[in-house]
Image: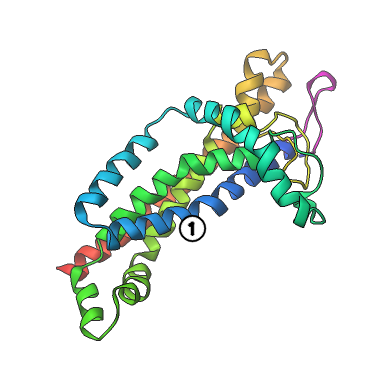
């Protein structure tokens, strides 16, 4: 495994793609996890049932939007915002940090991470909300009877009870982010380099497969892309399986405690 990807010279180093996939997914989770869990807590514990159900309906619709639509959203909205608003706001005070150094072309790791965050937030909200709703009512009522406020009951009783399932929602979102192709391809820059700056263009495993598979000439070139696809498949398969397991464990625990 090297960092050089040059099909002409038969050099097929996968590190830039693995790095790009991990960085964009990490940026997405940093943004999506607090927002998604916060929204799920609001919908499950604080919002009136009618408001919660209405908002959840629209959140489910967002999860069904094709990824190319999110890619277009990234190209026409996030990329210009990155150049004119986000980059100056972060580079000026924090430009001494390697992750915020260098020029911004609009496309890059952070842009792809932001688009991915928008895509995976609905998954975190939906799954976390269902997990929180599976917590037995007795747990909430016992905490309130002991003098806890509504917030204390939620934060110290409900969330700890549901934390395994919430972790499952995060793994599910991570698997979704790792496997995303079209939206990331449109905004990451498609440059097979490893760069410390989040503003630099990069590449992901899914993007290089989508861009180069039909152009692959020669057995080694094709085998390299297939190997990358296998790595991506194994990662997403394991994460999806782990996420489902954690969610099932939490819902079963809630059913047993409630019964």
Q: Quadrant of the N terminus?
A: top right
Question: Number of callouts in the render?
Answer: 1
Q: Depth check: 212 or 84 in front? A: 84
Q: Is the residue 251 above or below the residue 91 in the image? A: below
Across and down, in percent, residue 14 comes to: 72, 36
Residue 12, quarter of the rendered image: top right
Q: Is the residue 153 above or below the residue 36 in the image? A: below
Residue that numbered label 1 is attached to: 34
Span shown in magenta: 2-14
Q: Quadrant of the C terminus?
A: bottom left
Residue 170 as seen in the image, left or right of residue 186: left
Please give the name of the residue rendered at 31% of the width and 57% of the height, measured from the top-left corner: 131
Q: Depth check: 127 or 9 in front? A: 127
Across and down, in percent, residue 106 comes to: 69, 34
Mark 1: give few (<14), some (14-19) or many (20+) Cα within 10 Å.
few
Is residue 106 in view? yes
Give the colour scheme shown: rainbow
Q: Residue furthest left?
A: 259
Q: Secondary structure at mark 1?
A: helix
Residue 137 as seen in the image, left or right of residue 115: left
Please give the name of the residue rendered at 36% of the width and 56% of the height, measured from the top-left corner: 40
Residue 157 among those drawn in magenta:
no
Q: Is the residue 28 above or below the residue 250 in the image? A: above
């Amino acid at each position: 495994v090297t960092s050089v990807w040059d099909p002409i010279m038969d050099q097929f180093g996968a590190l830039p793609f693995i790095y790009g996939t991990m960085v964009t997914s990490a940026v997405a989770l940093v943004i999506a996890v607090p927002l998604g869990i916060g929204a799920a807590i609001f919908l499950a514990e604080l919002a009136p049932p009618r408001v919660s159900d209405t908002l959840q309906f629209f959140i489910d619709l967002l999860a069904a939007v094709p990824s190319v639509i999110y890619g277009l959203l990234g190209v026409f909205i996030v990329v210009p915002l990155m150049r004119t608003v986000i980059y100056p706001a972060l580079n000026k005070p924090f430009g001494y940090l390697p992750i915020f150094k260098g020029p911004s072309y609009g496309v890059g790791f952070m842009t792809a991470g932001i688009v991915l965050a928008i895509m995976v937030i609905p998954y975190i909200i939906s799954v976390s909300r269902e997990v929180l709703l599976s917590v037995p009512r007795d747990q909430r009522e016992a905490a309130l009877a002991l003098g806890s406020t509504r917030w204390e009951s939620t934060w110290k009783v409900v969330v700890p009870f549901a934390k395994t399932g919430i972790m499952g929602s995060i793994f599910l979102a991570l698997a979704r982010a790792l496997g995303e192709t079209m939206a990331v391809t449109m905004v990451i820059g498609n440059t097979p380099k490893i760069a410390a700056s989040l503003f630099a263009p990069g590449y992901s495993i899914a993007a290089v497969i989508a861009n180069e598979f039909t152009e692959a000439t020669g057995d080694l070139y094709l085998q390299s892309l297939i190997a990358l696809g296998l790595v991506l498949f194994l990662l997403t398969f394991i994460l999806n399986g782990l996420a489902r397991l954690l969610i099932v464990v939490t819902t079963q625990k809630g059913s047993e405690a409630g019964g």
